[in-house]
Image (cartoon, helix red, strand yellow):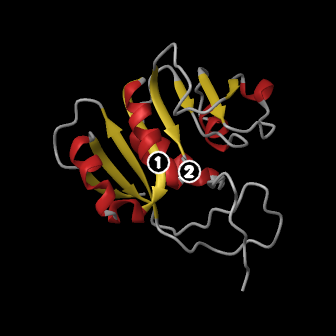
Amino acid sequence: MNKVRRQSEDWYVEPPECVEKLIEIEQYFGNSILDPCCGKGNIPTVFHKAGYQNIECHDLVDRGIEIPSLQATFKQQDFITSPKDKKWDVIVTNPPFKDAVSIIQEALKVTNYKVCALLRLAFLESDRRTEFFKQSPLARIWVIKKRLTMYPGDYQGKKNTGTLAYAWFVFEHGCNHRPQLGWI
């Protein structure tokens, strides 16, 4: 069995294909995008390749994201606690699971349209998040059909096929209906 150690900052890297599928299904991302938990920049890179230009990247740790090739800006900061002097149209992120609720709540305060968070499907399963879901504008849940394994960002070993169910949780300002469920 391939034993992988837990990453201290909860930094796990999403496959670019799951970001591409989000872009295909959601289509509209406005004129400004932020990934507040960018790691090495997979999400911003996929958006840049899809033609988006106004992309910002934040993370607690500078992991060497290649900003010049992305034409993006990077800030090393804690998204939850740092002051924000602007709003973005959309936030797209793979947040640390332990901080997901706080990051989504903060993201909803500083977005014009929506927040897309890549999370384990198990995010739906907690009694502790019941009130959060009642109060949040969760519009869509896009379950990723192919199970994923998200390895620690600095993992160099052998990589196996997917083991966990993930979904994009899309929170949209003004949503007042039950969330739509779909598969990508």
Q: Quadrant of residue 122?
A: bottom left
Give how far across and how far down residue 27 sits, in percent: 42, 36
- What residue does disc 2 label? 96
Please state if 114 lies on the left or on the right of 11 as rendered: left
Q: Nearer the viewer, residue 69 or 93?
A: 93
Tell me the residue at 43%/32% (across/down).
106
Position of residue 32 relative to residue 183, above or below, is: above
Left or right: 116 in relation to 45: left
- The outermost residue toward the bottom is 1
Residue in view at x 52 percent, y 69 percent: 147
Which image quadrant is residue 44 in?
A: top right
Q: Position of residue 76 (x, y in %)?
A: 70, 29
Circle number at residue 169: none
Q: Position of residue 116 (x, y in %)?
A: 44, 41
Labels 2 & 1 near each other (Cβ < 8 A) = yes
Report crowding for label 2: few under 14, some 14 to 19, many 20 or more residues within 10 A (C-alpha): some
The quadrant of the image that shows the C terminus is bottom left
Front residue of 88 and 11: 11
Q: Nearer the viewer, residue 126 or 159?
A: 126
Q: Is residue 129 above or below residue 101?
A: below
Q: In the image, what residue occupies the spot 60% across and 33% down?
A: 78
Q: Does 179 sit above or below residue 149?
A: above
Q: Report the amino acid beneath label 2.
A: Pro
Q: Secondary structure at mark 1?
A: helix
**Label 1: how many residues lie within 10 Å, few (<14), some (14-19) or many (20+)?**
some
Rounded to the nearest angstrom, the CA distance separating label 2 from label 1 is 6 Å
Q: Which residue is mark 1?
A: 100
Secondary structure, mark 2, is: loop
Name the image quarter holding the N terminus: bottom right
Q: Amino acid at mark 1?
A: Ala
What is the x, y in percent for residue 8?
69, 56
